[in-house]
Image: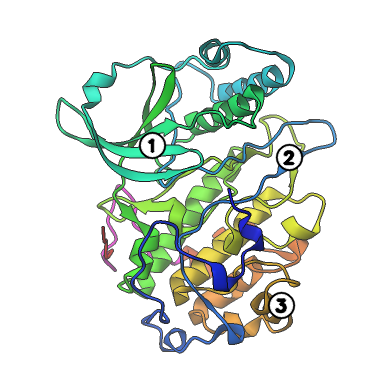
């Protein structure tokens, strides 16, 4: 996989995805439509995840799963009879076993870590079009035989030639163990996990609309992207409340259903930063995610708080939705002139955002993590609290969502 952290803007090319707009996004806010961020700004392009990092703590050692996954990556429902914290136990077992044991059978290894549900694949019918592919696997559309209901199905990647089975197994196991605990209206839902012919598959709900494409369509109103931003933040708040950081938040990893409900996807970079009944917060080291969204301290510090890394990425998502362009390609002062300008003159960017959002977004994009806004700060912000937001139970009457295939 190419090292995207070393790519400059003249070499960036959209990976397998045609874009029809490279001009400045026309927002309903007049000041936004006159964008000129820090003398330079960069057109939005789909972002591949990059970077490998580690998770560190003074008394605990667990590696963060860092393999990037394709467009639709999701999760498995937990067994109703198990305790809510059981998946953390499974993660610990997986990490411990993959570090100490040597298994000659992938199938045996899977069974020793995770009792997945064996489901007859025939009930889901035949493969349809490919929805996305990446280092982590391939996702396709499939229709259930009984009622033709669409689902997304992901085939997990095979082990790389230069990757040990222990490392590969740890990454795959951690991904679907993390996913098995996630149940929230703004997190994509997994229906089944299936093993067939030595391969593992996830069957997931299908959310057909891509937030990246919607932003690029230039049809989003201000209220619409406010709503999307709030839904993403609520999804991240849920993740953090159970000790999980996403670590690859970006437009590409947000999809919408037909009701305008945003769903977070792709947990290949996610990590557990806190276990239940344990007050220790595990820090990570090294950049992880997609370059324009990665926080600056991941490049400059030996370890950092992954919760604040997610907050930074949330701020970048808001800027992208608001102005339709990346403010910089990488948050490294030595490599990106626009980011260097932002550090000296942050208001040049912030003043291009809607007036009521500026205060909290400025705090979210504070380059010193100790001064950065927390999720508590965001949730208590008056502008954020007053955003009219679509939820499954009630469709907001104040705006519609311009969905696009």
Q: Secondary structure at mark 1?
A: loop
Residue at left offset 80%, top offset 37%: 57
State the residue position of label 1. 189
Q: Earlier in the sequence, mark 1 or mark 2?
A: 2
Residue at left offset 48%, top offset 79%: 354
Picture coordinates of residue 84, whole percent (x, y): 54, 25
Q: Earlier in the sequence, mark 3 or mark 1?
A: 1
Asked if 200 appears above or below 405 in the picture, the reply is: above
Q: Earlier in the sequence, mark 2 or mark 3?
A: 2
Q: In the picture, which quadrant includes the C terminus?
A: bottom left
Mark 2 packing: few (<14 Cα in 10 Å), some, or many (20+)?
many
Residue at left offset 53%, top offset 67%: 12
Q: Magenta span covers which residues?
A: 386-400
Q: Quadrant of residue 404?
A: bottom left
Asked if 391 appears above or below 118 in the picture, the reply is: below
Magenta-colored stretch includes residue 290:
no
Circles 2 and 3: CB atoms closer than 8 Å:
no
Q: Main secondary structure of the magenta part?
A: loop
Mark 1 packing: few (<14 Cα in 10 Å), some, or many (20+)?
many
State the residue position of label 3. 340
Circles 3 and 1: CB atoms closer than 8 Å:
no
Q: Which residue reaches farthest front? A: 161
State the residue position of label 2. 55
User: Which of the pair 235/119 is nearer the observer?
Assistant: 119
């Amino acid at each position: 996989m190419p090292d995207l952290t070393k790519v400059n803007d003249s070499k960036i090319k959209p990976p397998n995805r045609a874009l029809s707009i490279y001009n400045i996004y026309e927002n309903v806010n007049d000041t936004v439509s006159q964008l000129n961020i820090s003398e330079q700004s960069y057109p939005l392009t789909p972002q591949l995840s990059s970077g490998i990092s580690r998770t560190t703590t003074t008394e605990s050692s667990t590696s963060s799963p860092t393999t990037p996954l394709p467009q639709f990556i999701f999760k498995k429902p937990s067994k109703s009879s198990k305790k809510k914290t059981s998946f953390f136990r499974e993660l610990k077992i997986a990490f411990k076993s993959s570090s100490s044991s040597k298994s000659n059978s992938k199938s045996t290894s899977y069974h020793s870590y995770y009792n997945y549900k064996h489901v007859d694949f025939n009930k889901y019918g035949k493969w349809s079009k490919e929805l996305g592919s990446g280092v982590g696997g391939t996702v396709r559309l499939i229709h259930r035989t009984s009622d033709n209901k669409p689902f997304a199905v992901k085939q997990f990647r095979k082990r790389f030639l230069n990757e040990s089975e222990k490392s590969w197994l740890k990454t795959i196991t951690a991904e679907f163990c993390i996913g098995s605990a996630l149940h929230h209206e703004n997190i994509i839902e997994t229906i089944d996990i299936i093993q067939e012919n030595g391969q593992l598959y996830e069957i997931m709900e299908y959310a057909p609309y891509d937030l990246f494409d919607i932003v690029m369509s230039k049809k989003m109103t201000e209220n619409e992207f406010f709503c999307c931003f709030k839904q993403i933040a609520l999804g991240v708040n849920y993740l953090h409340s159970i000790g999980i950081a996403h670590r690859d938040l970006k437009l590409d990893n947000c999809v919408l259903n037909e009701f305008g409900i945003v769903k977070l996807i792709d947990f290949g970079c996610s990590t557990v930063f806190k276990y239940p009944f344990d007050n220790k917060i595990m820090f990570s080291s090294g950049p992880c995610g997609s370059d324009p969204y990665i926080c600056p301290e991941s490049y400059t510090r030996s370890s950092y708080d992954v919760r604040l890394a997610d907050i930074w990425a949330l701020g970048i998502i808001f800027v992208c939705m608001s102005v339709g362009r990346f403010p910089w390609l990488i948050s490294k002062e030595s490599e990106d002139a626009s980011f260097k300008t932002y550090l000296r003159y942050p208001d040049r960017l912030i003043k291009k955002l809607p007036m009521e959002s500026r205060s909290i977004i400025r705090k979210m994009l504070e380059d010193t993590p100790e001064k950065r806004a927390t999720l508590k700060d965001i949730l208590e912000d008056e502008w954020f609290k007053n955003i009219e937001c679509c939820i499954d139970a009630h469709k907001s009457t104040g705006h519609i969502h311009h969905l696009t295939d």
